[in-house]
Image (cartoon, rainbow, N blue to C red):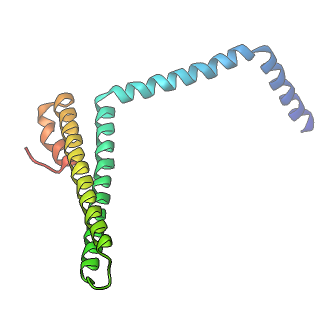
Amino acid sequence: MSGFLRYGFLMTIEYLTKYWALLIASVLGLAVLLFVVFRVYQDSSRGRLQAAFDHLRERQKAAQAASKAVDKAVAKLDRLQGKPDSIAPRQVEAAREALGEAREVQKLVDDQVLVVKNNVRIVIVEDYPPKRHEAMLSRYLDERT
């Protein structure tokens, strides 16, 4: 058994020293092939739709976070306004400003969601046949045409 392992190991070293260029070219060729396959997928209609939909989900999560920030700012302002005698006016004013900023961020992110939804809609309309539009719009955007 020991001789078999030693022989197999020696053959591997001999093989590597003899065909090292072929092995390196094979590894590089495989890397290039994987990159080309990845790019072909990205440029396909399915890849474009998936990228647009992933961006939509990301913006929707940001919109939810912005909505929670607005709710939190409203709650803080209400709590501070509920104690007018024990809270400094500058703290109430700071809470009002924070609420205004949170609402501005929420509006900005909501607008981004609308833009990204439109991008998903454009990918569906341009890259897929009309008979699939309604099903895909309801699946990806929860809307009917």
- The image position of residue 77, as x and y in percent, is 26, 73
In the depicted structure, whether residue 126 falls above or below residue 90: above
Q: Residue at x 16, y 48 (%)?
A: 138
Count of numbered circles in the view: 0
- When asked about the image quadrant of residue 99, the answer is bottom left
Direction right: furthest residue? 3
- The image position of residue 112, as x and y in percent, is 24, 44
Q: Nearer the viewer, residue 123 or 4?
A: 123
Quarter holding the N terminus is top right
Q: Residue at x 9, y 47 (%)?
A: 144
Q: Nearer the viewer, residue 6 or 129?
A: 129
In the depicted structure, whether residue 15 falls above or below residue 87: above
Q: Nearer the viewer, residue 16 or 75?
A: 75
Answer with left or right where residue 117 lies relative to residue 134: right
Answer with left or right where residue 38 lies relative to residue 133: right
In the depicted structure, whether residue 43 falls above or below residue 119: above
Q: Residue at x 71, y 14 (%)?
A: 21
- When asked about the image quadrant of residue 96, the answer is bottom left
- The image position of residue 89, as x and y in percent, is 28, 74
Direction left: furthest residue? 145
Quarter holding the C terminus is top left
Q: Residue at x 18, y 28 (%)?
A: 126
Answer with left or right where residue 108 lies relative to residue 61: left
